[in-house]
Image (spheres, rainbow, N blue to C red):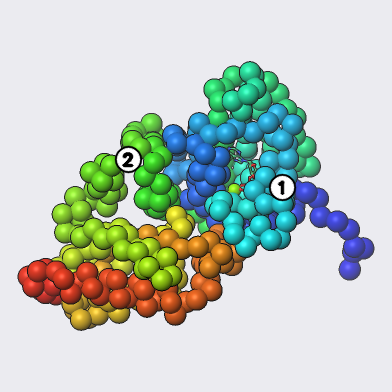
Amino acid sequence: MAAIHLLSPQLANQIAAGEVVERPASVVKELLENSLDSGADRIELDIEQGGVKLIRLRDNGSGIEKDDLPLALSRHATSKILQLEDLEAVGSLGFRGEALASISSVSRFTLTSRTSTQDAAWSVSAQGRDMSTEVVPAAHPAGTTVEMRDLFFNTPARRKFLKTEKTEFRHLEEVVKRLALSRYDVGFGLRHNAKVVHQLRPADTEIAREQRLGQLLGKAFVEQSVALDVVAEASGLRLWGWMGLPTFSRSLPDQQYFFVNGRVIRDKVVTHAVRQAYQDVLFHGRHPAYVLYLELDPALVDVNVHPTKHEVRFRESRLVHDFIFRTLFRVIADLRPQDQAPAQA
Ligand code: ADP
Ligand code: MG
């Protein structure tokens, strides 16, 4: 065996990237979350070849100070938490400080940014073996642009796991959809190979939100769903959104979006509660469609379960389960009889 030595920063980052960066869609998720955390309300994405060739994101958020630019690419460097206690009530989407370090270790990566108080923009790139970075002047309005080219160019084994351009783009678009459904106040633009795929303006009215819903999930979902907004007085839990009519059931669970405090999640407790509410009105093998938002005290939910953060842990899962189940069950019970009936398969 060789003597013990420290991993080079790039190798350490590449190993960490194995957890965070699976495909172009995971890169887009991390970049979009960073933009949302920075307070941006306008985000433009340019994608080439399913995101493998190019992912360019531009936002109008807080920007990054010149001196912080190299740090942004370092592992375990974050502006979002200072101490362990902050994790208890983390309000930001990111907090691990791993994403940019990971992504920049497996691609050709440039970060360009300007804060509103700086009168010049600066840029930092990383693609060298030691991940050394140099800060150079650049032209850019207030905000940040991240450019990632040639994903996995230096890790051919991982590159081999990428699927076709079409499949990679489908995954990537799904990520954009989820985040666009989580923040109606933010405008999103998505272009693929120079063609506009989505152009979503900030939506601040009920009508505008339903328009966005229609653009992302299709008109049929909007027409065949009911809006709800229920607050439990005792616990303060709030559930709002749209639930598809039982008659709009699907053969696949492909239109199920559940957000907890603005974060898209997949959770057994939630899925079970929703299923149970629909149980009597759906045929076996059919799946409900829904876009639902649960809001609760951040201290009652643990988001630090998994690096990609699709999982949460509720402090009082029984309470959450019963609230979701009862709320949805009541909405279904109040539907017109013809809307309750299971769809004829
Ligand atoms: P995390 O999001 O977990 O903090 P990242 O590696 O994703 O870690 O980002 C590192 C840091 O870089 C962030 O904490 C933030 O300060 C800064 N940053 C990244 N992207 C942006 C952006 N689009 N706008 C402003 N700051 C950003
Ligand atoms: Mg992040």
Mark 2 close to ligand 1, CB under 8 Å: no
Residue extending farthest to the left is 338
| Pointer 2 or 1: first along the chain | 1
Residue 164 in view of the camera:
no
Tell me the tag on residue 77.
1
Describe the element under mark 2 as helix, strand or loop.
loop
Residue extending farthest to the front is 234
Q: Are marks 2 and 1 in contact (CB under 8 Å)?
A: no
Tell me the tag on residue 203.
2
Q: CA distance from mark 2 to mark 1?
A: 33 Å
Quarter of the displayed picture in which ligand 1 can be seen: top right
Position of 169 compared to 229: left or right? right
Residue 266 in picture, x, y percent from top left: 44, 67
Quadrant showing the C terminus: bottom left
**Residue type (three-letter) at the residue carrying disc 1:** Ala
Residue 136 in picture, x, y percent from top left: 71, 23
- Residue found at x 43% / y 70%: 235
